[in-house]
Image (tube, rainbow, N blue to C red):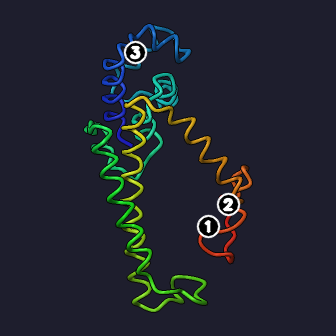
Amino acid sequence: MNPRLQKAILLAEMEEKGITQKELALGTGYSESRVSQLLNIEKPPRQFMIAAASFLDSIRLQYVIRGTIINPVYLNQIRDDFQTVMDKTRVENEETNKVIGAIKQLHNARSYKDCTRDQQRQIEEVVRQKIDDIIAGQHLLIAAKEFGVDVREAIKECNLKYIDRGYTSGKGTIKKDTCSPQASVSM
């Protein structure tokens, strides 16, 4: 990801939250002089940026540092109100469900190459729409966090739900596919 964009978002988040370099130093475990140096170079090290994102509790900065489907330039511009983002997410979810509902049964297809061309086109459309859906979801998480929602707690609850439903063991291994009983995937 773009280190200059990361730094710009870090500085903007510090300003928005009223965090000084001294406070950032205390929160990240770096000395105040080292933080000053790092904030004045073109490409601060990844470890420092991760520590700063964690201290600032910034989902926006974490997405940019760790990588995301969202165009990173857009992350610096997202300032929609929570209701607007919820509305966008609802529309994307509805479109995804519509595309998935329209796909013909895959019957005995075990891979993409086993599908008819029509099925392949439908699968490609599902993938494109799901990407839109994921981007909308990431926007929603950012907006929810900025709205005051404890997003980390919500993520923990979602993970527990997936463990309870048997989709994952909680150790990074998918026990059963969420769509069909045939697949088994390790992460």
Give the quarter of the figure containing the N terminus. top left
- Which picture quadrant has residue 179? bottom right
Neighbor class of circle 2 (other Cα within 10 Å; few <14, some 14-19, many 20+) is some
Question: What's the residue type where badge 1 is placed?
Answer: Thr
Q: Earlier in the sequence, mark 3 or mark 1?
A: 3
- At label 1, counting other C-alpha atoms closer than 10 Å, the crowd grade (few under 14, some 14-19, many 20 or more) is some
Mark 1 or mark 2: whose residue is earlier in sequence: 2
Residue appearing at x 40%, y 53% in the figure = 69
Is 166 on the left-hand or right-hand side of 139?
Answer: right
Q: Nearer the viewer, residue 2 or 183?
A: 183
Between 124 and 157, the one nearer to me in the picture = 157
The answer to whether the residues at label 1 and label 2 have Cβ atoms under 8 Å apart is yes
Q: x%, y% of residue 183?
A: 67, 74
Residue 71 % position (x, y): 32, 49
Q: Which mark is residue 178?
A: 1
Check contact, mark 3 vs mark 1: CB within 8 A. Answer: no
The correct choice, above or below, for 178 with respect to 86 in the image is below
Of marks 2 and 3, the one in the foreground: 2
Kindly identify the residue that appears in the image at 57 percent across and 82 percent down.
Answer: 111
Q: Disc 3 vs disc 1: which is toward the camera?
A: 1
Tag 3 secondary structure: helix
* In the image: residue 166, left or right of residue 60: right
N-term-proximal mark, 2 vs 3? 3
Q: Which residue is mark 2?
A: 167
User: Residue 154: horizontal and vertical position, in percent?
Assistant: 55, 40
Q: Hey, what amino acid is under mark 3?
A: Gln
Check residue 37 in the rendering and tell me which mark sits there, or answer none: 3
